[in-house]
Image: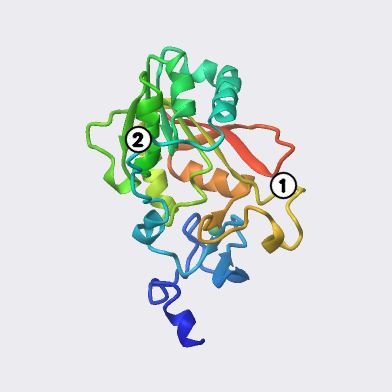
Amino acid sequence: MTPENVQARPFDNTVRLSACPVCDANDIAPSVEKSGYCFSRCPHCDFLFVNPRPPQAWLNSLYASPVKEAEPTYNKAGSRLRRAYFKLPRFFPYAWRKDAVDVGCGGGFVAHALSLVAHSSTGIDISANAIAYARHRFSRPRFICANFAGLPNDIGEFDFVYSSEVIEHVSDVNQYMRALNKLTRDGGHVYITTPDLGHPKVPAQIEHWDVFQPPIHVQFFNRRTVTVLFERYGFRIVKFYKNRKPGLIFLAMKAYG
Ligand SMILES: [Zn+2]
């Protein structure tokens, strides 16, 4: 390794995982490498993850852009809002007159759409800039700037938890699951989207997949992986939605008690 590479990543000395963080199997194997990030793959649950793991604080810093002094803006705001409205019928059975939360809400488009049908709507995001935009643009939801480890104790529980394209970003998938578990009321539903490692449109050479971008995305799942992971935290997968694009979209319910 050249001296330039030594300082490229601040976490080379962090502990390399020897077991799968999803199913605890201890025969994970080295897999692909991209941009200097090495992935391990679990032969049992198919989890594919950067190993050694970047620290969460370092990943957080990728999203910690300073709040702009001028009015914050959001890329493609119009189409984001239209897509959020378009999704509402799918959420309706689980969110109507219920307490809803968007975990990783960005500019607040889905949290706003949910606020039109839910009893209450909350948006949580790590980016202060995104939360500033959301608060400026949408008055109905409550917006909270926090990370998974720093959720307010009094944040409450929710009947419908929406979290789109978040789980592939987090360093510790178990910390994310603990946060989901804490936020979801017994009998409540979670709606998750993430890239689908098992989709037929994923390139055979996975490093050519457009979303295969460490350190932005540090792990990948297929149906089996998320089934094992969510069952471990007391959720039952209710359904996987059909998707022509290589994205997993699924609904899970938290068991009672
Ligand atoms: Zn595993």
Residue 137 visible: yes
**In-front residue for pair 200/139:** 139
Q: Position of residue 53 (x, y in %)?
A: 44, 65
The image's mark for residue 199 is 1
To which quarter of the image does residue 245 belong?
Answer: top right
Q: Residue furthest front?
A: 70
Instruction: Check disc 2: other Cα within 10 Å, few if <14, some if 14-19, many if 20+.
Output: many
**In-front residue for pair 31/7:** 7
Image point (48%, 80%), residue name: 5
Q: Quick one: SS at disc 1?
A: loop
Q: Which of the four quarters of the rendered structure image does ligand 1 lie in?
A: bottom right
Image point (55%, 73%), residue name: 36
Instruction: Check disc 1: other Cα within 10 Å, few if <14, some if 14-19, many if 20+.
Output: some
Q: Position of residue 99 (x, y in %)?
A: 38, 20
The number of numbered discs placed on residues in the rendered structure image is: 2
Q: Amino acid at mark 2?
A: Ala
Q: Position of residue 27 (x, y in %)?
A: 55, 69
The image's mark for residue 132 is 2
Lateral position of residue 76 relative to residue 98, left or right: right
To which quarter of the image does residue 78 belong?
Answer: top right
Cα gap from disc 2 to disc 1, whole angstroms = 36 Å
Q: Position of residue 117 (x, y in %)?
A: 46, 13
Q: Is residue 156 above or below residue 95?
A: below
Q: Quick one: SS at disc 2?
A: helix
Q: Is residue 25 above or below residue 160?
A: below
Query: From the viewer's perspective, is the residue at label 2 or at label 1 nearer?
Result: 2
Tell me which label, 2 or 1, sits earlier in the chain: 2
Q: Amino acid at mark 1?
A: His
Residue 124 visible: no
